[in-house]
Image (cartoon, rainbow, N blue to C red):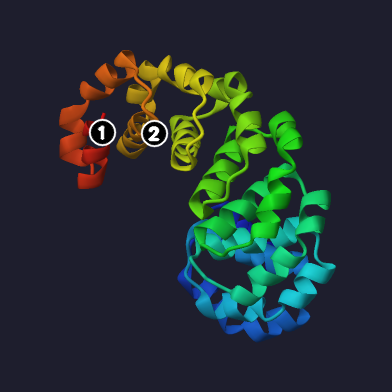
Amino acid sequence: MATITHSLGKMNITTSSYYDGIIACRDRIVKEGKTQELSNICWAFATIGYKCDALCYAVSTQHARIVKTGDVQHISNIAWAFAKLNYKSDSYFEAVAKEHARVIKDGTLQNLSNVCWAFATLEHKAPSLFKAAGEEHERIAKDGNAQDFSNIVWAFAKMEYKSENLFTAVAGQQERFMKKGDVQALSNILSAFAKLGYKSMELFEAVASEHVRIVETGDIQAMSNIVWAFATLGIKSSDLFKAVAGEVERIARDGTEQEFLNTMWR
């Protein structure tokens, strides 16, 4: 059952009768299923965006077993799935937070990235987890990719947790993630720096040099957030601002009021 569900999720197949059947079997699934199977099922539902509060609740009742016997990958996937489905479970996230040392020590960087993102998305405070994550700044800078950087610093900013060592380490990798990161990732990183008041001229100048790519491939929200970050930290870039100003008609037509105001505030 878990294997089939996982495969359907990977293929983005949304057959409601099948998924409703899985939800109906939730009590048996959580009673008999291993943590990997619970993880795969939750991941599939989240990947296709199929709302399943009853299933999530049933899985959350197994929080003690999941964090005690599950791999960090399983723990991370379930947290990510709950956040994607906007399902809040204090019991599950508290259990994960208490296991933060194992999550960080035994998990991959992607696991850590997903866990931080999930906690921040659901606004579940976990200062010890984030403090420990920040102490992994050297590993994050060495092994992380643009999406990892984006998820982690965004999560810190969302939760208003500061870590100067982490943000300095991420800024030092700007050349690497500038080449491989998409505009949305750059937007999230710059917004996080601005929200927490970290001013890295080298990072912001590198982003400004990508002004053509930003307006050609970035969506309105990404452009808006980038300009807002520059303005918030008082960093000027005539090339970037001129490039975005050239898109003002598109922003006014297709963007939200807040996105338009963010863009004009410079």
Q: Amino acid at mark 1?
A: Thr
Quadrant of the snapshot with the N terminus: bottom right
- Kindly identify which residue carries mark 1: 263
**Residue 138 in picture, x, y percent from top left:** 75, 33
Of 198 and 98, nearer the camera is: 198
Sequence order check: which comes first, mark 1 or mark 2?
2
Q: Quadrant of residue 28?
A: bottom right
Q: Is residue 128 above or below residue 58?
A: above
- Kindly identify which residue carries mark 2: 229
**Residue 127 in picture, x, y percent from top left:** 64, 58
Give the residue displayed 53% in from the left and 28% down from the top: 181
Left or right: 26 in relation to 212: right
Q: CA distance from mark 1 to mark 2?
A: 10 Å
Quadrant of the snapshot with the C terminus: top left
Query: Looking at the image, is mark 1 or mark 2 nearer the viewer?
Result: 2
**Residue 55 in picture, x, y percent from top left:** 58, 77
Q: Is residue 148 above or below residue 46?
A: above
Name the element at disc 1: helix
Give the residue displayed 60% in from the left and 74% down from the top: 90
Q: Quadrant of residue 171?
A: top right
Give the residue displayed 68% in from the left and 44% down from the top: 134
**Residue 239 in picture, x, y percent from top left:** 32, 13
Of 24 and 71, nearer the camera is: 71
Give the residue displayed 80% in from the left and 65% down from the top: 70
- Label 1 Cα crowd, 10 Å radius (few <14 / some 14-19 / many 20+): many
Left or right: 39 in relation to 208: right
Q: Amino acid at mark 2?
A: Ala
Residue 254: mark: none
Left or right: 154 in relation to 235: right
Of 161 and 180, nearer the camera is: 161
